[in-house]
Amino acid sequence: MITLDNIIKTYPLGKGSSVTAVNGVSLEISQGEFVLIVGRSGSGKTTLLNLAAGLTQPTSGKVLIEGTNLWDLTDQQQSFLRSQRIGFVFQFPSLLPTLTVLENVILPTVFNSKQAAAQAHDRATELLQKVGLADKLAAYPRQLSAGQQQRVVIARALMNQPLMLLADEPTSNLDEKTELEIMGLFHDLHASMGITIVMVTHMRQLVAYGTRAVEMANGQIVNGHAN
Amino acid sequence: MNKTMGILMIALALTIAIVPLFTDCLANGRTLTTADGRSVPMKCHWTALAEIGLAVPLALIGIFNLTSKRKETFRTLNVISIALGALVVLFPTVLIGVCANASMPCNLIEKPLLILSGILVMGASLVTLASTRNFIEPVAA
Amino acid sequence: MSAFQLAWKNISGNAFRNGVVSLCALLLSAFALFTTLVIRGAESSLRLTIDRLGADIVVVPEGSEAKIESALLMGIPARFWMPEDHVNKLAAIPGVDVVSPQLYLATLTGADCCSVSDMFMIAYDPSSDFTIQPWLEEELGNGLRVGEVVGGNYISATEGEQNIKVYGYLVTLKENLEPTGTGLDQTMFLTFDTAYDIASKSAVQAESQLVIPPDSISAALIKVKPGSDPQEVALQIIQKVPGVTPIESSDLFQSYRKQMTGLLRSILVILSVTWGLSVVLIGLVFSMAANERRKELGVLRALGATRRFVFRSLLAEASLLAFFGGVTGLAVASMAIFLFRKLIMVSLEIPFLLPSPVSLLLQIGAGLLLALFSVNLAALLPAFKISRQDPAVAMRE
């Protein structure tokens, strides 16, 4: 499903210096896997996830999604691919504060979806029911707890029926009880929908939720299977 | 939005209360002489004084717009302020009036200023009412 | 939900920033409308007044040009005299079709006998007049009788139903003229007979007498024969009638025209500076806003928004803010100009006439376009920059 082929990502720091966040990583993720990428802060795991999603261009190397080189596509094609194939769950609160919960979940359909408005409404309602927030459709993000907001983000990520979910430290801002709830939700989604999940985390104890774990340090994979 | 309209309302209330007192004919040295020789102010002065009676509740409503947190409070007060704004316009035009001569100071400044202020009060109130449609009251701690 | 609906919802966040942008649009459009209405209002007022006079040439005593302009434009009473027999001399000049003499008078200031104060009065000769008399015959079916007057737009009866007291004499207001936006709106028009009647009775009835020097007139309005050149006729007047100045209607109000050109230049400079500053300020606010929202915009890109969508969405927000600010500014400016038109005339010392509804709508449309253009121009660079930003970089702490 996703193939990262000898990816290098270097960020310029100005005055001629730079930092290499990902240093020659190759990784293959198959359909139906639940892969956890673990590592300390600064190990390059978030950058690797962003590279996999096409949110940043590699300095060298290839990113293939279902065999297509992401960076051979135009911006429009890439955006289409992101909206239809990939769902995102971010570490930071990523709901738009001026939209209601329902409107936030419907948001991905604004960009590229062929779903009619009524269909989108029904699907969003269904997803919010699935994540246990059926009574919060008209609420605004500021009226929800951090855990509830993250559930909405997960519902939004599933809106366009993506092939994979990419989650960047989705539980790092949550208390332990809520973290377990959210991880349970991911586990259930993986089990019931067979969706591919790639999750980045610095919490080693969460690897038990996945089918495979990969460890990163200093921009390289140091442990775990690359495929 | 409510806070902005609240500040605007207070500013308009101050304008309505203060400016006419300086722009009526009495403030510009013109009075009416009665049959028995007394000098009395003309009706533009009484209009100016009456407007103070409207400006005070308007200023209070402006303060409530700044501080209130309840949807019902906004709604009630701003419906009242629409009525007050209408009265601000009606006092110098229909209910009391100002001098007849078009070149008197009250016609040059006092009356048009009051009409404009009254219309702005009504506009600000309508905007506040519209913006509180989706008002979310803060959840009690 | 469409891109437009998304933009609409987004502008409800950060009221202060959006308020600043809207306020700039409001001030810009209001100021632009105000200046165009004032300048064009003054121009159309002047044109209407010249048309109203109906004269090709106005002849006044030498040195009285400024006084007659003030009288006609601002209603400031003028008193000057020249010999009545100039009428015959003028009529004898080749090219002259009709000569109509006028008397310029003024009411008393603050007198007990009078209900209006300091008002300009124009007395005309019904037998030769070519503007008021024909109009009266059309409106009323006959001319003015002794004791009857016609008033400019602002003249109203103050004594009983239709009467006004001047110099202790009660005149009847028969009709009001359409507004011109000039001093003619505060002017009373009466026949020579009425003027002399008032003068003779004022010795007894008024606080001070209305004095009309015998065998004198104030001005003579001339209509030239069709095909004659007013300039040629004017030259002949200078040669054959000493002590007078002929003013061609096209030259009338020259000093005011010059004043207005000067005023227009200053206003255009101020408007340009205001516009420049507004665009810079809006650009800065947009840059700040785009920077603060970069994470949010990065999320949109991650969810599938193209660069073009983000760019268009930001410009849609800018347009909405400009629209609301512009509409508010234009509405307030239109109301203010309508309500304060008299004050504008008096304080700027210019004539002023409100435009027709169609003309007003066109000017309002132009003001709105200016607001939309300016705000979009200011938002262009920040919107472009943020839409091109790497989403991963945008979402970084």
Image: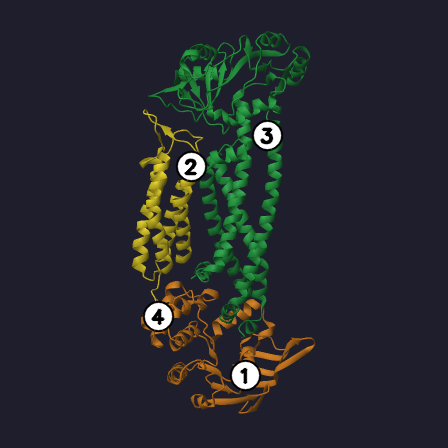
Chain colours: A orange, B yellow, C green
User: Which amino acid is tagged 2?
Assistant: Ala
Q: Which residue is mark 1?
A: A45
Above or below B104: residue A127: below
Q: What SS does tag 2 mark?
A: loop
Q: Which residue is mark 2?
A: B27
Instruction: Give the spatial CA distance, label 3 vs label 1.
Output: 76 Å
**For discs 2 and 4, the disc positioned in front in the rendered view:** 2
Cβ atoms under marks 2 and 1 closer than 8 Å: no
The answer as to whether the residues below labels 3 and 2 share one chain is: no
Instruction: Give the spatial CA distance, label 4 vs label 1.
Output: 33 Å
Q: Which residue is mark 3?
A: C256
User: Does residue C42 appear in the picture of this structure?
Assistant: yes
- In the depicted view, which residue is nearer to us: C115 or C397? C115
Q: Mark 4 — on which chain does it sit? A: A
Q: Mark 2 — on which chain does it sit? A: B
Q: Position of residue A68 (x, y in %)?
A: 57, 76
Cβ atoms under marks 4 and 3 closer than 8 Å: no
Q: What SS does tag 4 mark?
A: helix
User: Which amino acid is tagged 1?
Assistant: Lys
Instruction: Give the spatial CA distance, label 4 vs label 3.
Output: 70 Å
